[in-house]
Amino acid sequence: MLTACDMETDEVSGLMAGADDYITKPFSLSVLRACVEAVLRRLDAKDDHFIQSGEYRLDIDLCKLYSGSDEITISATEYRLLKYFMSNAGQVLTKEQILAALWDNQGSFVDENTLSVNISRLRAKIEDESKSPKTIKTIHGMGYVWVKG
């Protein structure tokens, strides 16, 4: 906050309302710059550019998947599927939830095998044995779950 209100109660109220900092007028440009840089450092430290789950790291900015330091080539659909799974790791996701989140936002028709085909392709890329998956598990009668690593 940048304000002329310089009472202690005003400052406390501003910070309690969610302000990262409270600067009163008159102020120095060097103090303002230092406060802005401090906020930017805190934002950079959050590292929201990746979703990490076990050995897998999904780069949100570059749409790339890594296992350790090795990049795994994935399609745009596999990326969206992975992002949804990894963001909801440990939760059972129904087929309907996944289809609605990834394909049906425009009301377009999707073949009922689309999901199972894409999960099968993804498993072939990330599972040691795609026939007995350990990362993307099928929960019979319900859907799928991404097992946290």
Image (cartoon, rainbow, N blue to C red):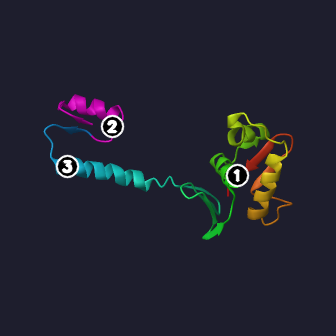
Percent x, y for residue 117? Answer: 82, 52
Local packing at callout 3 (Cα closer than 10 Å; few below 14, some 14-19, many 20+) is few
Observer able to see residue 134: no
Percent x, y for residue 48? Answer: 50, 52
Q: Nearer the viewer, residue 83 or 63?
A: 63
Outermost residue toward the left in this view: 26
Tag 2: residue type?
A: Ala
- Whether residue 13 sits left or right of residue 81 in the image: it is left
Q: Nearer the viewer, mark 1 or mark 3?
A: 1
Q: Distance from label 1 to label 3 (Cα)?
A: 47 Å
Of the numbered discs 1 and 3, the one sitting upstream in the chain is 3
Instruction: Find numbered disc 3 in the image and state the secondary structure of the residue it sits on.
Output: helix
Which quadrant of the rendered structure holds the N terminus?
top left
Write down the residue under mark 2. Answer: 19
Of the numbered discs 2 and 3, the one sitting upstream in the chain is 2
Give yes or no for residue 96 being in the magenta stretch: no
Residue 60, by quadrant, is bottom right
